[in-house]
Structure formats: C-alpha cells, structure tokens
Image (cartoon, rainbow, N blue to C red):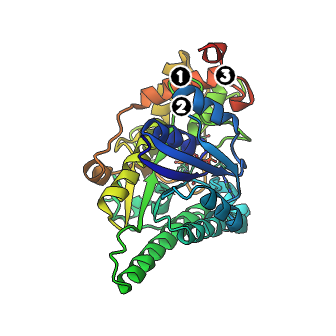
C-alpha cells in the first residue's frame, strides 16, 4: 500500500539517495528530479538492489520550471516535496556567487512556484547548520538550539538562509490566502532541516557518497588517505580552545539523517505545523583528532596527517542541540560515529571509483 507520493529534488545525490531509500522502505512512492550535476544514475540500481523498488527518475534542472510542471502533470498524485537539489561547496560559493544564488535560491523559487500551481503543499528543505555561522559569538549557544540567531558567514550559507525565508514567506502567504477564502490553509507546511555534518554509507557497502571531483569534507578526505589517493590529511588548526586543540563538529550518520526526513515529512502531514526548523544532529561533538582516530580504527591502521594553519571561515564548535527533533519528531540518532566510520570504509574499499564501477558480484547474483 502506498502511503503518499513524494517528489525528491536532488534525489540521486548523497543525502537524497538515502532518503529515497528510506521513503521507499516506508512505502512512499518516489519521483526523483535531478540534473546529475553531482550524481550518477547508477545509484538507482543500488537503491533497487537494496530495497527491491525503483523510484521514477527525470533528468530535470530545478531552475527549469516548465520541466518541473511536466513532472507534476505526469504524477498528479504527488502531494509532497523533499528538496535537496543545490550546489554545496562553501569555497566555490565565494568564487561563483551568482551561480549559487541561481541554482539554490532561484531553483527553489521555481520549485515552489511549480508545486503551488499543482497544489503540492508540503515541502521538506535541506538547510544546514552553516546558517548559524559562529554560534560561539553568543553566550550559552553551544550546543546550538534552533532559536540561536542565524548569521551565515559564507555565500553558500546565505543561499540556505535565504531559501529558509523564501519558504517561510511563501507558506505564510498561502495560508493567509486560504484563510481569506474561508479555508484553513493548514495543508501548507514546511520543514527546514538544519543538518550538522553528514557522514557514513550504507552498511551493505554498495551505497555512499559518490566521489566526483576533489572532496573537501573531512571524512571523504580521510578515506582518500586510507586508499592511498592522498598522501596525508592536513589538520586545519590545532590551536582551538578544545580539549585537543582541533575544531569540534557534530557528525551524523546518513542513515539517521535520512530517517529524519521521513519523520519530518510525516509530522508535516499529520500535525500541519506551518513552517518549522529542526536541527538534525547527534548532540555529541567530536574533534578532528578524534575523527582521525575513529576512522583509523575502522581501517585498522594509522592514517598520516600533518597539522596546518586554520582554514579560513572555520569555527571552533558546531554541535547541535537536537532536543526539539528528539521531542517533537520522536527522532534521535541511533548510529554512532564508529558505525559511520566502519560503513564509510566498507563503501570506499568496495567502490574506490564510486558509482563508476559495478557493485560487487554477490549483489548481482542475489
Ligand atoms: P549532493 O551534491 O550529493 O546532492 C545534491 C543533488 O542535487 C545532486 O544529485 C545534484 O546533481 C543535484 N543538483 C544540483 N544542481 C541541480 C539542479 N540545478 N537541478 C537539479 N538537480 C541539481 O549533496 P548532498 O551532500 O546530498 O546534499 C544535499 C543537500 O543537503 C544540499 O541541499 C546541501 O546543500 C544540503 N546539505 C549538505 C550537507 C553535507 O555536508 N553534505 C550538510 C548540510 C546541508
Ligand atoms: C570538518 C572539520 C575542518 C578537512 C561543511 C560545510 C557545512 C556543511 C558540512 C553543507 C573542520 C576539519 C576538514 C581537512 C580538516 N555542508 N578539516 N582537514 O566545515 O564543518 O562543514 O560541511 O551544508 O556547510 O561548511 O565540514 O568536513 O569540511 O570539516 O582539518 O582536510 O574538519 O577544519 O573542523 P564543515 P568539513
């Protein structure tokens, strides 16, 4: 029995693909739109190998509203959207800001506009902990609660906080319009999910983050040190005010994160809250040195690193206070950092070229 239909924008990407898997496993019908800018259609085969179900897929750019209209027309049963499609490299966003605003902000406007024409009224949006900027500038805001004032310090983060405002204003306007017509308008809802540091892979070893281009996140870089693609990891600063001098982040397993989307969507459908922001994090901070240790343990040997100067724009501590999601969504992380490291290593070992290679034979025989 299908419980609902979801259009997943950016659904072949890293977090999107795991959320598609969670949705299919929960008996949602899934339609993906993605222009494959940073993903590979092979992920559809992997999703099918794991779940026995295959989502519909359209190669569509979210800035192309007419193409989005067509997809909604072909699938009139779609009543929800989960929106992952975006450019996400912080450094690059400073170099090509217009492209970041075009894809992330204009693309979101086009998606909301097309949804609205087709009376699709629930949206779950991939926001980011980066919208908080440096929360250590306030007293008592670490771990970071949702009411911490937002103040992104980079272009990418500003596109995310702008889209949060766009969604909030649009949903509010649709609710007002409905009320003027004597309706409740309560079908219009938005979840702004602020993820902390997603990591890990599927425990089967056949789904993970597809290494297109040069990674810039800590764990994918460490994985390259482990496979020999990279000589050593540069640790960006050991003079922070933490227990070992390296910066603190809240790493969250992508399987837990995917479940967070499912429960947020269900909450919108059942409770009609309007627009709400939730932190998706574990509430546990880990330093860079702790991460190196955890991943080295998963790999079974020491990994080379060297301390380098701080990276521009980095902050001391981004640890979530996930109490709101724990209480309201009845969601909390279940997997550990150690699980994420073991799963990431299995995926990396099996698929050093990511989705550009066949999955192991045992899966094809199964
Ligand atoms: P990803 O790059 O793997 O996934 C994004 C997907 O969007 C890709 O499949 C890409 O091809 C697609 N896409 C890009 N531009 C598009 C366009 N114009 N039209 C259609 N599709 C387009 O990234 P991810 O890590 O899975 O991130 C998913 C979302 O979560 C993004 O919005 C990102 O900003 C946000 N986020 C990511 C992290 C992280 O560390 N990975 C943390 C917080 C928030
Ligand atoms: C983690 C820690 C680095 C690489 C970024 C985005 C954020 C979100 C998640 C999308 C930091 C240190 C890293 C290296 C290192 N993405 N590090 N050597 O910066 O917390 O967050 O990804 O929304 O917006 O900013 O993640 O993985 O890059 O870094 O020492 O080679 O590892 O300094 O302390 P970050 P990260």
Residue 204: which numbered mark, if any? 1
Residue nearest the observer in this picture, 180 or 255: 180
Q: Is label 1 in contact with label 2 (beta carbons under 8 Å)? A: no
Whether residue 233 is visible here, answered yes or no, is: no
Quadrant position of residue 2: top left
Query: Is 284 above or below relative to 360?
Result: below
Q: Quadrant of the N terminus?
A: top left
Residue position for label 3: 359
Alpha carbon separation for disc pair 3 and 2: 14 Å
In the rendered structure, the answer to whether residue 169 lies left or right of residue 83 reads: left
Quadrant position of residue 150: bottom left
Residue drawn where x is 53% and y is 22% of the image: 204
Residue located farthest toward the left when viewing the structure as drawn:
327
Q: Is label 3 in contact with label 1 (beta carbons under 8 Å)? A: no
Neighbours of disc 1 within 10 Å: few (<14), some (14-19), many (20+) = few
Residue 142 location (% of width, % of height): 34, 54
Mark in the foreground, 1 or 2: 1
Residue nearest the observer in this picture, 54 or 231: 54
The answer to whether the beta carbon of the residue marked 1 is less than 8 Å from any atom of ligand 1 is no
Residue 108 location (% of width, % of height): 59, 65
Residue drawn where x is 51% and y is 52% of the image: 6
Mark in the foreground, 3 or 2: 3
Q: Quadrant of the C terminus?
A: top right
Residue position for label 2: 201
């Amino acid at each position: 029995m299908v419980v609902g239909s979801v259009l997943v924008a950016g659904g072949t990407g890293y977090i999107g693909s795991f959320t598609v898997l969670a949705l299919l496993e929960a008996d949602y019908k899934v339609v993906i739109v993605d222009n494959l800018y940073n993903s590979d259609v092979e992920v559809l085969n992997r999703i099918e190998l794991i779940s026995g179900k295959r989502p519909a897929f359209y190669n569509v750019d979210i800035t192309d509203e007419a193409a989005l209209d067509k997809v909604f027309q072909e699938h009139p049963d779609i009543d929800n959207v989960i929106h992952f499609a975006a450019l996400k490299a912080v450094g690059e966003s400073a170099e090509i800001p217009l492209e970041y605003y075009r894809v992330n902000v204009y693309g979101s406007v086009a998606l909301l506009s097309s949804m609205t024409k087709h009376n699709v009224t629930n949206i779950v949006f991939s926001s980011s902990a980066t919208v908080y900027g440096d929360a250590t500038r306030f007293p008592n805001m670490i771990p970071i609660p949702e009411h911490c004032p937002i103040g992104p310090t980079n272009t990418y983060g500003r596109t995310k906080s702008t889209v949060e405002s766009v969604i909030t204003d649009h949903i509010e306007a649709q609710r007002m319009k409905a009320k003027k017509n004597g309706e409740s308008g309560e079908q219009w809802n938005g979840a702004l999910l602020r993820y902390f540091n997603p990591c890990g892979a599927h425990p089967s070893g056949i789904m993970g983050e597809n290494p297109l281009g040069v990674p810039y996140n800590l764990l994918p870089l460490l994985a390259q040190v482990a496979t020999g693609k990279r000589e050593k990891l540069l640790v960006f600063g050991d003079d922070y005010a933490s227990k070992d001098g390296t910066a603190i982040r809240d790493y969250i397993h992508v399987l837990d994160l995917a479940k967070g989307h499912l429960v947020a969507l269900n909450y919108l459908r059942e409770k009609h809250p309007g627009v709400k922001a939730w932190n998706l994090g574990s509430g546990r901070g880990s330093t860079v040195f702790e991460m190196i240790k955890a991943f080295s343990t998963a790999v079974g040997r020491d990994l080379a690193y060297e301390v380098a100067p701080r990276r521009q724009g980095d902050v001391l501590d981004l640890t979530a206070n996930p109490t709101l999601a724990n209480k309201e969504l009845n969601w909390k992380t279940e997997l550990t950092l150690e699980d994420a490291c073991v799963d990431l290593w299995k995926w990396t070992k099996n698929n050093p070229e990511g989705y550009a290679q066949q999955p192991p034979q045992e899966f094809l025989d199964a």
